[in-house]
C-alpha cells in the first residue's frame, strides 16, 4: 500500500538522522527505570525551558545542532523504542541542517529572539512546504507534501524555531466518528500517555501534548475545535493555550470548522507557551478571521507574566455542569481554588453561566461543524497538488476502499452526517450557528463575566486519563461541548495536580482576545503550585501502591 511505502521512507529518513540504539530503554516498558536511564530522565534536557536552552547556547555550552540531535536521540529511545510513546509521526529530514544554519547565524549576528534554534513539533494537520507530509493522520493525504508553509509555520521559522517534525494527531482531528479513539490515526497508530502508558493522551492534539510532556521537543503546536488543545494539556500535565479564534492564522491547516478552529502552543511552562504564542499572532490576508485581531494581538505575551497576577483578581468558579462530574478531579479543583484564594484572588463561587444547562445538552455546535467541515475541506484539498481526493465524498470513498486500515476500529459516521448537509446558506446551518454563538458568548461567558464583575472564569479542564480502548472508543469524563469552544474564546489550561499518578489541569477562561489576562492568572497559579512533574513512563497503574491525590 502507499501508506506502507511512505512509512518505510519515513523510517529511513529518521535512521539517516540518528544511529542511536535503544538498549536499556525497553526496561521502562516494564515499569522500572534502570540506572543507565536515570541520568537521561533527570539531565538538563529533561524539563529544560526556552530560557535554559538559550542560556546554554549563549554561553557556548550547547548549539542548536547539538540540541536537535539530543531531542532526536530521545525520540529514538523513548518514542520509537523503550516505552514507545508513539507521539512523533515524522521527523523533519532537514532539522539538523536548519539547526546548523541557525548556529552559524547566531555566531555571526546573534539570536533573532527567544525561539532562535529551539526545536518544536507541529501537529500533523499543519502544512510545511518542505519534505514532510501533512496527513491529518489519514492515508488519503499521505503522499506529496504541501506546496508552501502554513502561515504560522512561516512565522515560527522567521522567529528562528527549528521545525523538528510532525506529531501524531487523532485522525481528522476526531471529526470522523463519534467513537474515535483519541491519539489514533491510520498513518501513525496509537499515541500513549507518557505518565501511564495504557492511558489515553486525550484530544486531537494528543501527539503534540504527549511529545512535549515526554521532553521529545522544547514545545509543540496544536489545533483545537473544541477541547483538542486543553484536554491533552490537562492529561499530560503541560500548559495549553487555546487562542481566540482569529488570533492565529489557520491558512495552511487542515480544515475542521472556520467558526471554531484555532491554533495554539503546548509547552511545559506558561512562560514558554507565552513566548511561542507571540510570533504566531497577527493579521493574515489568507485567513479573513484574523482581521478581527487587528489592534488586539501582541508579538510578545511575556510582558503579562506576573507572579502576583492572582492578587486582587476576581475569578468566577464554574460549577454547574462543569464540575462535579468526577470526584478525583473535584478534589484537585477545590485545592486549586484554595491556592488562588491564598494568592490573593477574590473567588466568586459559584459563578455559573446562565446558559450552562442549555450548553450541556445543546447540539448546535455539532451541526455547525458538520456543515463547515464539508464546505471547508474542499479549498484545503485544492491547495494540496497531487492528492487523489478533492471532496468529502472522495474521502468517504477512500475510507471504504481502505477499510481494513482506515475503518478497522471505528467508522466515519460524522463524515456521513456532514456529507448529507447542503451549503452555508441553509437556514438549518444559520440557525445552529446563531444558537451556538449566542448561548456561549453574550448569554454565556460574557454574561457571567459581567454579572459577577469577573476578570476570568475557572473550571476543571478534564478528568484523569482513561484507559485507551480501541474497541469502544474514548471514555471522556468532561463537559462537552465547552463554552469556550463554542464561543471561539480563549482558554489556558495549567497543571493543577495528580490523581492516582495521572495529571489533572484547570482552565482559565475569558472573553475574546483576553489572552493577556489569562496568561497572567495562569502564570501566577503555576508559580504558586509548581504542580507539573515529568513522566516516568509507567506501564500501568498499580492502584495499591500510589497515593490517591497529589495536588497543588
Image: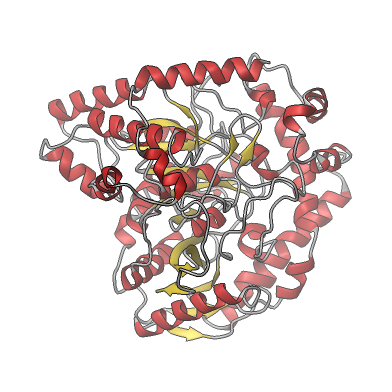
Image location of residue 447, percent across then percent down: 63, 75
Residue 20 in the image: x percent, y percent?
Answer: 33, 26
Front-most of 139 and 439?
139
Side of 449 relative to 494 (left or right): right
56 lies left or right of 147: left
Residue sitting nearer the eye, 549 or 144 = 549
Q: Height in image: 279 above or below 489? A: above
- Furthest residue toward left: 59
The C terminus is located in which quarter?
A: bottom left
Residue 205 shows up from this direction: yes
- All told, the count of numbered labels is 0
Judge by depth and name the residue closer to the eye, 547 or 142: 547
Residue at 64%, 78% in the rendered image: 324
Residue 281 visible from this viewpoint: no
The coloring applied to the image is: secondary structure
Q: Which residue is nearer to you in this view: 475 or 121? A: 475
Left or right: 381 in relation to 11: right
Is 287 drawn above or below residue 103 in the view shown?
A: below
Q: Residue at x 63, y 47 (%)?
A: 182
* Quadrant holding the N terminus: top right
x and y percentages locating residue 430 in the rendered image: 81, 51
Query: Which residue is rendered at x = 62% and y = 34% of the image?
Result: 254
What is the x, y in percent for residue 53?
A: 23, 43
Amino acid at each position: 500500500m502507499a501508506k506502507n511505502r511512505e512509512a518505510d521512507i519515513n523510517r529511513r529518513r529518521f535512521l539517516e538522522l540518528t544511529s542511536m540504539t535503544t538498549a536499556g530503554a525497553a526496561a521502562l516498558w516494564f515499569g522500572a527505570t534502570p540506572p543507565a536511564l536515570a541520568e537521561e530522565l533527570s539531565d538538563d534536557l529533561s524539563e529544560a525551558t526556552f530560557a535554559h536552552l538559550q542560556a546554554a547556547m549563549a554561553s557556548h555550552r550547547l548549539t542548536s545542532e547539538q540540541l536537535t540531535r539530543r531531542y532526536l536521540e530521545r525520540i529514538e529511545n523513548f518514542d520509537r523504542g523503550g516505552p514507545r510513546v508513539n507521539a512523533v509521526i515524522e521527523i523533519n529530514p532537514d532539522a539538523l541542517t536548519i539547526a546548523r544554519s541557525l548556529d552559524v547565524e547566531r555566531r555571526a549576528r546573534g539570536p533573532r529572539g527567544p525561539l532562535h534554534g529551539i526545536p518544536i513539533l507541529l501537529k500533523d494537520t499543519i502544512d510545511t512546504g518542505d519534505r514532510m507530509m501533512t496527513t491529518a493522520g489519514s492515508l488519503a493525504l499521505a503522499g506529496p507534501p504541501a506546496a508552501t508553509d502554513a502561515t504560522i509555520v512561516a512565522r515560527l521559522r522567521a522567529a528562528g524555531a527549528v521545525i523538528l517534525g510532525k506529531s501524531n494527531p487523532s485522525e481528522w482531528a476526531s471529526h470522523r466518528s463519534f467513537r474515535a479513539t483519541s491519539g489514533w490515526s491510520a498513518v501513525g497508530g496509537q499515541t500513549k500517555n507518557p505518565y501511564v502508558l495504557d492511558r489515553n493522551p486525550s484530544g486531537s492534539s494528543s501527539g503534540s501534548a504527549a511529545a512535549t510532556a515526554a521532553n521529545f521537543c522544547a514545545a509543540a503546536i496544536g489545533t483545537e475545535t473544541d477541547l483538542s488543545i486543553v484536554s491533552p494539556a490537562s492529561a499530560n500535565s503541560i500548559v495549553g493555550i487555546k487562542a481566540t479564534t482569529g488570533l492565529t492564522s489557520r491558512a495552511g491547516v487542515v480544515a475542521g470548522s472556520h467558526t471554531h478552529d484555532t491554533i495554539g502552543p503546548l509547552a511545559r511552562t506558561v512562560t514558554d507557551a507565552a513566548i511561542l504564542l507571540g510570533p504566531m499572532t497577527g493579521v493574515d490576508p489568507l485567513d479573513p478571521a484574523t482581521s478581527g485581531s487587528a489592534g488586539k494581538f501582541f508579538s510578545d505575551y511575556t510582558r503579562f507574566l506576573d507572579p502576583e497576577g492572582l492578587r486582587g483578581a476576581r475569578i468566577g468558579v464554574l460549577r454547574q455542569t462543569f464540575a462535579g462530574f468526577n470526584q478525583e478531579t473535584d478534589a484537585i479543583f477545590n485545592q486549586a481554588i484554595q491556592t488562588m484564594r491564598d494568592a490573593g484572588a477574590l473567588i466568586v463561587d459559584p459563578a455559573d453561566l446562565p446558559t450552562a444547562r442549555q450548553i450541556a445538552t445543546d447540539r448546535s455546535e455539532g451541526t455547525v461543524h458538520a456543515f463547515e467541515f464539508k464546505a471547508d475541506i474542499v479549498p484545503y484539498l485544492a491547495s494540496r497538488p497531487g492528492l487523489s481526493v478533492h471532496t468529502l465524498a472522495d474521502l468517504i470513498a477512500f475510507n471504504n476502499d481502505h477499510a481494513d486500515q482506515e475503518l478497522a476500529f471505528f467508522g466515519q459516521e460524522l463524515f456521513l452526517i456532514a456529507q448529507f448537509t447542503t451549503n452555508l446558506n441553509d437556514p438549518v446551518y444559520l440557525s445552529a450557528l446563531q444558537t451556538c454563538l449566542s448561548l456561549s458568548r453574550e448569554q454565556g461567558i460574557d454574561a457571567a463575566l459581567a454579572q459577577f464583575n469577573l476578570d476570568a472564569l475557572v473550571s476543571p479542564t478534564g478528568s484523569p486519563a482513561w484507559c485507551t480502548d480501541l474497541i469502544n472508543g474514548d471514555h471522556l469524563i468532561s463537559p462537552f461541548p465547552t463554552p469556550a469552544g463554542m464561543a471561539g474564546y480563549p482558554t489556558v489550561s495549567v497543571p493543577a495536580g495528580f490523581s492516582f499518578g495521572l495529571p489533572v489541569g484547570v482552565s482559565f477562561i475569558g472573553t475574546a482576545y483576553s489572552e493577556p489576562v489569562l496568561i497572567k492568572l495562569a502564570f501566577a497559579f503555576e508559580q504558586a503550585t509548581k504542580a507539573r512533574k515529568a513522566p516516568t513512563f509507567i506501564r500501568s497503574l498499580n492502584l495499591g501502591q500510589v497515593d490517591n491525590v497529589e495536588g497543588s
